Amino acid sequence: MGSEVFARGRLGGKVCIVTGAAGGIGLETCILFAREGARVLMADISQSALDKSSARLRELVPHAEKIDTIICDVSKEDQVEAMVARVDSWGGVDVMYNNAGIMHADDADAIDTPDRIWDLTQAINVKGVWYGSKHAILSLRKFNKKKGSIINTASVVALVGSATPQLAYTASKGAVLALTRELAICHAREGYRFNALCPAPLNTPLLQDWLGDDEVKRARRTVHFPTGRFGEAIEQAQAVLFLASDESSFVNGTDFVVDGGMTRCYITPE
Ligand code: NAD
């Protein structure tokens, strides 16, 4: 990596797609990507959320190389294909961040999780990651690229069991880890890296809207943090930036855990 690359930012010249771009981790990642010189396509299922978050991004990074938005339901392959095709005129994708995911309020344990919720969760959280990975690979090949970075958002629940079950979600994130690992091995000699991000519970709408003011529910989670707090979306975004950049050129197939030590902890400090 020459000094010229750093002068243009850690992602200078790279074309990046972020799904779930209007959400907590997604928007923070888009902000960092844009600040580091990337051209960013923000994709989300919600037009209103996308309008709001892209306006915020333009405000925070007025000199961004290029920012665009696209509506995409990641569980629909034709929409994912169209999303990736959108950056053809930018020279094709270099970094794909498959981040969109849901944790449904009706997701529960083995007995009470409705079939419909199981299927919806797998469609978005697993198929969405598969489609995003598939079309990123096809684009990288089409543009004859010798390197590419695909980052898929899993979760710590893919690594440790929880007695506050959301079985469909947990199963979906386990699948993300497994498929990311296999993709990493299959495509390593093409120069395409795949890594999974494993965030701990965060201060983002996905979890916080669900927890609401329920202090008991909150305490059930915070007690397991050595740091005594939930993570912040920006702390995940910093890890994604590293995995997206060439600084992580020899990092492949990892379960990249960003959890404040939660999954390494037996008893937390008093
Ligand atoms: P968030 O709810 O703030 O953002 C998720 C975004 O995804 C939203 O903007 C939403 O509109 C979008 N989305 C939902 N369904 C979609 C679909 N079908 N197609 C495209 N976009 C869709 O959530 P977040 O906390 O930023 O979570 C991002 C990722 O991190 C998710 O995969 C989530 O499972 C994972 N994660 C979150 C936490 C946490 O505590 N927040 C912990 C571990 C993992």
Image (cartoon, helix red, strand yellow):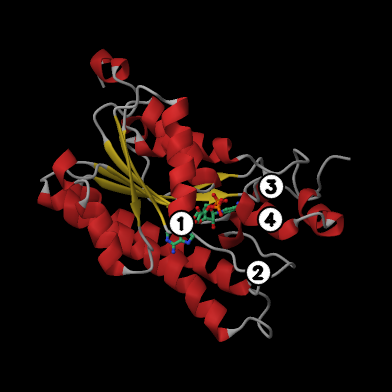
The residue tagged 1 is 46
The residue tagged 2 is 105
Residue at 43 percent across and 59 percent down: it is 45
Residue at 31 percent across and 18 percent down: it is 6
Whether residue 154 appears in this view of the structure is yes
The residue tagged 3 is 262
The quarter in which the N terminus is drawn is top left
Which is more N-terminal, label 3 or label 4?
4
Mark 2 and mark 3 residues within 8 Å of each other at the beta carbon: no
Task: Compare residues 117 and 110 and report the one nearer the observer.
Answer: 117
Which is more N-terminal, label 4 or label 1?
1
Residue at 68 percent across and 78 percent down: it is 109
Image mark for residue 170: none
Q: Is mark 1 within 8 Å of ligand 1?
A: yes
The residue tagged 4 is 209
Q: Position of residue 113 (x, y in %)?
A: 63, 81
Q: CA distance from mark 4 to mark 3?
A: 22 Å
Q: What amino acid is found at the position of numbered circle 4 in the picture?
A: Asp
Q: Is mark 4 within 8 Å of ligand 1?
A: yes
Q: What amino acid is found at the position of numbered circle 2 in the picture?
A: Ala
Whether residue 146 appears in this view of the structure is no
Q: CA distance from mark 2 to mark 4?
A: 10 Å
Q: Residues within 10 Å of mark 2 (few under 14, many from 20)?
A: few
Q: CA distance from mark 1 to mark 4?
A: 17 Å
Q: What amino acid is found at the position of numbered circle 1 in the picture?
A: Ser
Farthest right residue in view: 270
Secondary structure category for the residue under label 1: loop
